[in-house]
Image (cartoon, rainbow, N blue to C red):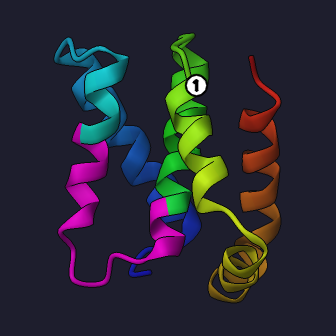
Amino acid sequence: MIFSYKELKDCVSDDFERFYNMGFDEQQIFPAVLNEYTHGEDFCQTENICIHILLGMNYAKKGLSMSAIKEKLEQLISKDTVKEIRVELGREYTEFISDLDSIMVHE
């Protein structure tokens, strides 16, 4: 990942707000924000999962449905990916897990 988890959190939040303020609905925001990152040369599985989590947090703040994001996270996350994420995020891993837990229990 090019960004730290904190930097990515700020960037995803800014992108979410931009599309939300442009009038995009919850089905449009998700792919629009994800598209901002998927074309980067260093885009990886860890970044993809982090973006999903961070989008989920922004959806929760606005009261939008997170069902599609949660479903995708369940498909993306495995024991192997968790190990990879732990290595890549280092000290930021605890914040990542806290954020993941918060959106997975959110209705």
Horizontal side, residue 75 vs residue 39: left or right = right
Instruction: Give the residue drawn at x 33%, y 22%.
Output: 27
Is residue 45 rendered magenta in the image?
A: yes
Instruction: Give the residue drawn at x 72%, y 68%.
Output: 78
Query: Where 103 sits versus 36, above or below?
Result: above
| Magenta span | 32-48
Is residue 29 rendered magenta in the image?
A: no
Quadrant of the drawing holding the C terminus: top right
* Disc 1 target residue: 67
Magenta region's main secondary structure? Answer: helix
Query: Where 78 sits versus 11, above or below?
Result: below
Residue 45, image x, y percentages: 48, 73
Residue 29, image x, y percentages: 30, 29
In depth, the one of 33 and 31 nearer the eye is 31
Q: Residue furthest bottom?
A: 87
Query: Where 37 sits versus 73, above or below?
Result: below
In depth, the one of 60 and 45 nearer the eye is 45
Instruction: Give the residue drawn at x 73%, y 47%.
Output: 99
Residue 50, image x, y percentages: 55, 59
Q: Residue furthest front?
A: 75
Q: Quadrant of residue 33?
A: top left
Residue 104, image x, y percentages: 76, 36
In depth, the one of 52 and 94 nearer the eye is 52
Check disc 1 and give the amino acid type: Ser
Query: Where 31 sits versus 85, above or below?
Result: above
Horizontal side, residue 73 vs residue 58: left or right = right
Q: Quadrant of residue 22?
A: top left
In depth, the one of 83 and 91 nearer the eye is 83
